[in-house]
Image (cartoon, helix red, strand yellow):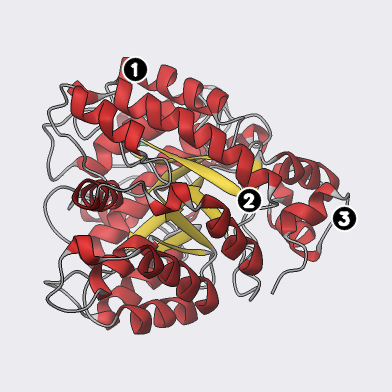
């Protein structure tokens, strides 16, 4: 149990072992431990880490590399724990910085404990899923009690979970705003919908809001980082940046202050489905209202009409959001809106989200130079027509434990050229022609 949390210690000027390790892990980006401590003390960076100290310290927020989360977890239809463990491992091999267990099928605690054992990175959960799934068989959602919710939080914290999504911003006032709105898709957040349905059926305030101080007590005890969920995130671009969304964000801003005052680290979550010209505004207002708490985004998906390709629609939105201040991207897979993702979907979604994160880092203060150095190496390898180096420098080079990009190599070799170039231009290769003209390489 934590007498003092990581945030308490950072505020007192202490460079803890976790801060030192996190700074070392981010050393390529030029972050020294004292700078990181100050960012943690202000709440502009969080290092999600349970008192069990299981996970690799992973700083998320200002001046840090843009982080990527991979969502995994069973469903009622597919409750195969081994498959979820495989997904967790693949996601981490593909570069996911964190994993969230969103399981809703099978033995939830067994699944969570096995994922924690199999995963070196910080693990997050959404405890209301657990409470909703494990309420007494045959009872209605409305029979779930406030104790069920807090018991789920405590049991996850005890197991070693590092961060938790809590939809504390879904208040009676927020729900009134939603009902008065003309939204097409009222609520698409699963946690937001469960919370709202419970509140409406019981005619009560959201326990995570009305008993937020109790939640903070548990979070302090286990030094859990709270991820304040966006229950009102828009589920289609017609609903983006509306009154319901921003009324929740205002509440989240207040909760950020209360969490920090209690020594609890917190992030804020964001939408959702947003057209490209509305992303900057939504991100900047959220960051402002939440005092620059690290912003964790799902997407945003920039069009509603690309099922099967939503890893791409969300990477486009994520890149724009990151350029404007988002710090942490939740992987979206090709299966989004369609089905529980497969292992291959998780691999694809993680890599595509990492591409968006890297594109952000190329322009992000604090990490720009180290990110650009990676691209510069690739440019030199291309200039030198050094194919092995290109495969090794590719962003998916460690995917599946490989040391080079299997995809890049197989495309290149399947349609190989007779010369040292690729089969696109052959002897008319612009790079070869210019290298020769400038006397750099034959
Ligand atoms: S052959 Fe064309 S596409 Fe291939 S490396 Fe040379 S310039 Fe690029």
Q: Is residue 408 visible?
A: no
Question: Which callout, 1 or 2, points to the residue nearer the camera?
Answer: 2
Indicate which label's residue lies in the foreground, 2 or 3: 2
**Disc with the residue nearer the chain's start (1 vs 2):** 2
- Residue 422 at x, y percent in the picture: 31, 42
> Residue 214 at what x, y percent from top left?
55, 59
What residue does disc 3 label?
14
Alpha-carbon distance for marks 3 and 1? 40 Å
Residue at numbered disc 2:
265
| Ligand 1 has an atom within 8 Å of the beta carbon of the residue at disc 2 | no
Q: Nearer the viewer, residue 217 or 253?
A: 217
Q: CA distance from mark 2 to mark 3?
A: 16 Å
Residue 47 vertical placement versus 232 (above, below)? below
Graded by Cα atoms within 10 Å as few (under 14), some (14 to 19) or many (20 or more), the crowding at tag 1 reads: some
Is 239 left, or right, of 223 in this rendering? left
- Between 380 and 126, the one nearer to me in the picture: 126
Q: Earlier in the sequence, mark 3 or mark 1?
A: 3
Return the x and y of residue 79 as percentages of the image width and height. Answer: 19, 77
Label 2 crowd bin: few (<14), some (14–19), many (20+), radius 10 Å:
many
Q: Nearer the viewer, mark 3 or mark 1?
A: 3
Quickly name the residue at label 1. 278
Mark 2, secondary structure of its residue: loop
Q: Secondary structure at mark 1?
A: helix
Which residue is depicted at the point 67% across and 34% down?
Answer: 369
Left or right, 307 with reference to 203: left
Residue 406 or residue 84, whichever sits in front: 84
Q: Which mark is residue 17?
A: none
Res 310 quadrant in image: top left
Residue 103 against residue 355 in the figure, above or below: below
Position of residue 339 measured from the top left corner of the image (x, y, whole percent):
13, 57
Label 1 and label 2: CA atoms lie apart by: 28 Å
* Dot 3: element: loop
């Amino acid at each position: 149990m934590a007498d003092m949390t990581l945030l308490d210690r950072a505020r007192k000027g202490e460079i803890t072992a976790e801060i030192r390790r996190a700074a070392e892990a981010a050393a390529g980006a030029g972050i020294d431990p004292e700078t990181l401590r100050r960012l943690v003390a202000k709440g502009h960076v969080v290092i999600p880490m349970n008192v069990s100290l299981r996970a690799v310290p992973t700083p998320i927020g200002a001046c840090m590399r843009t982080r990527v989360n991979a969502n995994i977890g069973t469903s009622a239809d597919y409750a195969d724990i081994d498959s979820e463990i495989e997904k967790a491992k693949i996601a981490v091999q593909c570069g996911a910085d964190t994993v969230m267990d969103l399981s809703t099928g099978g033995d939830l605690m067994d699944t969570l404990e096995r994922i924690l054992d199999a995963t070196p990175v910080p693990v997050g959960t959404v405890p209301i899923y657990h409470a909703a799934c494990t309420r007494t068989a045959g009872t209605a959602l409305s029979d779930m009690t406030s104790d069920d919710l807090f018991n789920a939080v405590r049991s996850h914290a005890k197991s070693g979970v590092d961060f938790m999504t809590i939809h504390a911003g879904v208040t009676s006032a927020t729900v009134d705003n939603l009902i008065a709105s003309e939204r097409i898709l009222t609520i698409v957040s699963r946690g937001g919908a469960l919370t709202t349905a419970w509140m409406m059926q019981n005619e009560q305030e959201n326990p995570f809001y009305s008993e937020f101080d109790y939640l903070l007590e548990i979070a302090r005890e286990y030094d859990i980082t709270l991820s304040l969920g966006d229950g009102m995130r828009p589920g289609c671009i017609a609903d983006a940046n509306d009154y319901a969304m921003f009324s929740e964000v205002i509440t989240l801003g207040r909760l950020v202050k209360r969490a920090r005052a209690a020594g609890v680290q917190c992030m804020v979550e964001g939408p959702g489905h947003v057209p490209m010209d509305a992303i900057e505004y939504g991100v900047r207002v959220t960051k402002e209202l939440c005092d620059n708490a690290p912003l964790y985004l799902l997407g945003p998906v920039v069009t509603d009409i690309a099922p099967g390709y939503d890893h791409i629609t969300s990477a486009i939105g994520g890149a724009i959001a990151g350029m404007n201040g988002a710090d942490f991207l939740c992987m979206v897979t090709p299966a989004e809106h369609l089905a529980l993702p497969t292992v291959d979907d998780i691999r694809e979604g993680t890599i595509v989200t990492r591409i968006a994160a890297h594109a952000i880092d190329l322009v992000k203060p604090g990490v720009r130079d180290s990110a650009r150095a990676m691209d510069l190496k690739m440019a030199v390898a291309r200039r030198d027509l050094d194919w092995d180096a290109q495969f090794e420098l590719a962003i998916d080079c460690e995917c599946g434990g490989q040391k080079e990009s299997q995809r890049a190599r197989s495309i290149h070799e399947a349609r190989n050229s007779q010369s040292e170039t690729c089969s696109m231009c052959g002897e008319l290769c612009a790079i070869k022609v210019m290298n020769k003209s400038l006397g750099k390489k034959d």
